Amino acid sequence: MMWDSVDLKAYHDCVADLLGTKEVNEMRDLDHHAHISCYEHSVFVSYLSFRICRRLHIDYRAAARGGLLHDLFLYDWHTDPHEGMHGFSHPKAALKNAKELCPLTPKEEDIILKHMWPLTLRQVPKYRESFVVSGADKLCALMEMFSFYRILKIKRHLALAV
């Protein structure tokens, strides 16, 4: 079951220190895709990546933390002409903000910096967890764009995850 209470507790144990920060909560005020906040998107990417990596017996903690911080760019990409095209530039901004927020493992850095692959052809993920988060990011974005969040009541479940 996707929203298993044991998994929710294990997930929360991985990211609780990040969820309480001002910076992560600032993502609540930024629209991501189709009436979904950057915070909601990041939590779902993080939780989905956590579940997949846990099932694969790989570093689910790094996936959860990197997934949560992968879009920590903290600007409205719809209106703020940041440095370059958003799809290419925001991973660097997110990594910079994440490094200022907390110490990161090399795997977490790779997850954040390379989550836009394959759009960023030369930024190929180094770790399996990075590929998982990149794939989860694309899946969640599609679900947002086609309103599956509403159909599957994902927002309600995300509230349980955090």
Image (cartoon, helix red, strand yellow):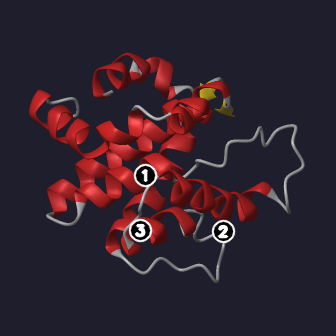
Residue bearing mark 2:
119
Q: Where is residue 142 in the image (x, y as percent from the top left)?
A: 56, 42
Q: Position of residue 120 (x, y in %)?
A: 66, 73
Q: In this view, does 29 lie above or below 32?
A: above
Q: In this view, does 7 lie above or below 102?
A: above
User: Which tag, 2 or 1, sits closer to the chain's start?
Assistant: 1
Q: Where is residue 18 in the image (x, y as percent from the top left)?
A: 40, 41
Residue bearing mark 1:
67
Residue bearing mark 3:
131
Relative placement, left or right, of 54 versus 41 is: left
Looking at the image, do the residues carrying marks 2 and 3 touch, with CB atoms under 8 Å apart? no
**In terms of secondary structure, where does tag 2 sit?**
loop
Relative placement, left or right, of 114 versus 84 is: left
State the count of labels: 3
Q: Is residue 1 visible?
A: no
Q: Which of the image's four quarters has the C terminus?
A: top left
The type of residue carrying mark 2 is: Leu
